[in-house]
Amino acid sequence: QVQLVESGGGRVQAGGSLRLSCAASTEMNIMGWYRQAPGKQRDMVATITSDGTTNYADSVKGRFTISRDNGKNTVYLQMNNLKPEDTAVYYCNGVNTFRFFTYDYWGQGTQVTVSS
């Protein structure tokens, strides 16, 4: 069974930094981070392909950096200059494709709270 295990969430003041980590139990073509605030839909934060191509939500560009260690099947999200609106549950996502099928995996989520 494929597992994604996140760590690194917590509480921080506005302007502070946090680093999230997510270790997958197997290789993933694409890894990423999504977040969901109370009463809102889950939105993409950042994604990274196995060759290092990245994509960011406009709201986090210049503040967040996604990276991955393919040897460890791990993805990271460095979050700087955090704002109260970044408060959400952050979910790690992994995607694999095989032939005509796409397999989508999710971590359990980690809470990030930014106080003003």
Image: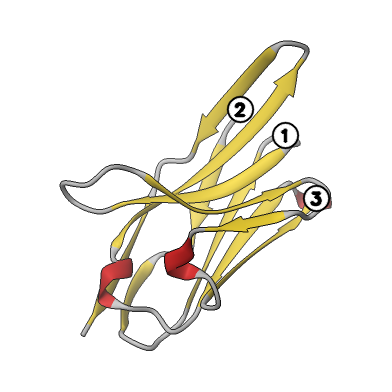
Please tell me whether residue 114 is drawn above or below residue 25 in the rendered image.
below
Q: Looking at the image, do the residues carrying marks 1 and 2 touch, with CB atoms under 8 Å apart?
A: yes
Residue 60 at x, y percent in the picture:
47, 69
CA gap between label 1 and label 3 equals 10 Å
Q: Which residue is mark 3?
A: 70
Name the colour scheme.
secondary structure
Tell me which numbered mark, 1 or 2, is placed earlier along the sequence: 2
| Residue found farthest to the left | 39
Q: Quadrant of the N terminus?
A: top right
Q: Amino acid at mark 3?
A: Asn
Q: Which residue is mark 1?
A: 26
Q: Residues within 10 Å of mark 2 (few under 14, many from 20)?
A: few
Residue 83 at x, y percent in the picture:
32, 78
Residue drawn 26% across the image and 75% down it: 84
Residue 94 at x, y percent in the picture:
60, 37
Q: Which residue is mark 2?
A: 2
